[in-house]
Image (cartoon, rainbow, N blue to C red):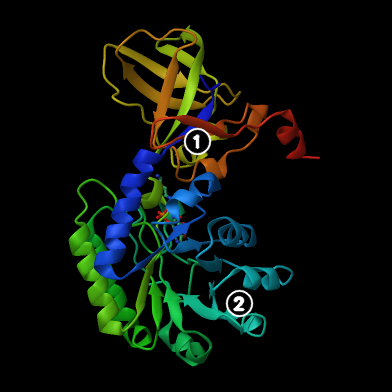
């Protein structure tokens, strides 16, 4: 048995997402780039590579990882590049997408050897969190004024528009794309490619994949553009668990268990968005609040129902822990960093990374 805590990536579950992505690419002609900000666990890149066209990034480190570990097409994007990093970014990328006209102009010379694009902000999004809403008031994410973009069209050949967020509603996607066409149609007509970003949950169970593919194909035909998507969450959803062990039991008006992990350190995204972790099937007569072992009073994964009483040494699988989790893990409280394991298609388990004291020590100085 692998020592907990560890993240467990199940390739057979990952495969379900990969097959949907491959189908979508085939039906729509769109290309799919893995958004590394969401998931950058490169041990499964060899597996994902056959189903996706490459990666997109949000920093120098990510573009380098995409280039070196994934290969294929490598898009560079960042909210802002620094002077000292631009040459290296360009050396790793096929395309560079600038967030602003200011950055495009600033790095015009350094980026002249690769394909260039600009992020557009349509002012509409599907985000229910203002923290993750690219269209929030006074947003810094992309250019919105057609009149300012027109004069730099000779420097770029395409656009990136990321305005979806956890959007599993095709009709909403369709409506917002219509608004984008209304607003930016004249610019889209001049583009060779358009990336519609991530945030579209098209690998979800009931998502109308064929309608989505038809809409992308129609968009591509109308404007004569190669469409890209940048799925992060959709690529890895439901593929991974965080495996933990019960270390202690307490009672304080509720039955509590403390596990050998921490939501703050190992599932930080949930804490940021004030969401509960998930267990499956979450049924049974025994209800526990599952707590982390850091000193943070609110280090709580959630309250769940179990078939049997929980005892010290029992294991719990926290569900759906790939996206925005492994990339955000941290050394808060010095809590043991979860190892990373993979369940292969034949069911065998392989540990691909373990972390020890040296990793903790070396993360600071
Ligand atoms: C530009 C861009 N592309 C893609 C993504 C990936 O989004 P998701 O993981 O929701 O698919 C994000 C999320 O931040 C993004 O900002
Ligand atoms: N589950 C809580 C909301 C998570 C939102 N994720 C945001 C990431 C996203 N790609 C973005 O910031 O646009």
Q: Which corner quadrant of the image does residue 273 belong to?
A: top left
Q: Can the viewer see residue 158?
A: yes
Residue at 40% across / 84% down in the picture?
Answer: 191
Check disc 2: other Cα within 10 Å, few if <14, some if 14-19, many if 20+: some
Q: In the image, residue 184 lies at what x, y percent?
A: 34, 81
Mark closer to the chain start, 1 or 2: 2
Ligand 2 is within 8 Å of the C-beta of the residue at disc 1:
no
User: Residue placed farthest to the front in the image?
Assistant: 346
Secondary structure state at the residue bearing disc 1: loop
Q: In the image, residue 181 lies at what x, y percent?
A: 29, 78
Q: In this view, does 273 lie to the left or right of 103?
A: left
Q: Residue 299 carries which label?
A: none
Q: Can the viewer see residue 174?
A: no
Depth order, front residue of 26/281: 26
Q: In this view, does 286 lie above or below 152?
A: above
Q: Check disc 2 and report the residue beneath it.
A: 103
Residue at 45% across / 12% down in the picture?
Answer: 314
Secondary structure state at the residue bearing disc 2: helix
Q: Check disc 1 and report the residue beneath it.
A: 267
Q: In the image, residue 66 lies at what x, y percent?
A: 56, 59
Q: Do the residues labelled 1 and 2 touch (CB within 8 Å)?
A: no
Q: In this view, does 273 lie above or below 175?
A: above
Depth order, front residue of 15/98: 15
Q: In the image, residue 65 lies at what x, y percent?
A: 60, 56
Q: How far apart are marks 1 and 2 (CA)?
A: 33 Å
Q: In this view, does 91 lie to the left or right of 195?
A: right
Depth order, front residue of 182/110: 110
Instruction: Locate the C terminus by quadrant.
Output: top right
Q: Which corner quadrant of the image does residue 68 belong to?
A: bottom right
Q: In which quarter of the image is ligand 1?
A: bottom left
């Amino acid at each position: 048995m692998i020592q907990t805590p560890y993240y467990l990536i199940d390739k057979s579950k990952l495969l379900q997402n990969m097959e949907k992505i491959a189908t979508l690419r085939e039906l729509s002609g769109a290309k799919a780039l893995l958004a590394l900000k969401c998931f950058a666990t490169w041990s499964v890149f060899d597996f994902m590579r056959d189903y996706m066209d490459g990666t997109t990034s949000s920093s120098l480190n990510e573009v380098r990882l995409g280039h070196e570990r994934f290969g294929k097409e490598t898009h560079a994007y960042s909210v802002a590049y620094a002077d000292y990093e631009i040459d290296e970014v360009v050396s790793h990328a096929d395309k560079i997408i600038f967030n602003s006209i200011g950055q495009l102009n600033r790095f015009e010379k350094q980026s002249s050897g690769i394909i260039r694009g600009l992020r557009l902000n349509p002012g509409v999004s599907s985000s229910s969190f203002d923290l993750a809403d690219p269209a929030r008031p006074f947003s810094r994410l992309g250019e919105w004024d057609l009149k300012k973009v027109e004069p730099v069209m000779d420097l770029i050949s395409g656009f990136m528009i990321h305005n979806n967020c956890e959007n599993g509603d095709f009709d909403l996607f369709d409506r917002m794309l219509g608004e984008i066409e209304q607003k930016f149609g004249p610019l889209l007509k001049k583009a060779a490619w358009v990336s519609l970003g991530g945030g579209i949950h098209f690998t979800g169970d009931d998502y109308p994949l064929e309608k989505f593919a038809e809409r992308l194909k129609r968009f591509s035909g109308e404007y004569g553009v190669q469409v890209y998507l940048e799925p992060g969450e959709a690529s890895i959803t439901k593929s991974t668990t965080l495996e933990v062990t019960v270390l202690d039991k307490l009672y304080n008006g509720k039955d509590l268990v403390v596990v050998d992990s921490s939501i703050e350190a190992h599932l930080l995204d949930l804490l940021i968005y004030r969401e509960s972790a998930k267990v499956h099937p979450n049924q049974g007569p025994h209800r526990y609040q599952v707590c982390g072992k850091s000193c943070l009073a609110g280090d709580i994964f959630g309250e769940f129902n179990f078939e049997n009483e929980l005892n010290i040494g029992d294991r719990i699988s926290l569900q759906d822990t790939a996206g925005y989790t492994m990339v955000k893990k941290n050394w808060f409280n010095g809590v043991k960093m979860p190892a990373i394991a993979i369940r292969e298609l034949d069911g065998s388990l392989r540990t691909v990374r373990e972390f020890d004291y040296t990793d903790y020590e070396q993360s600071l100085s």
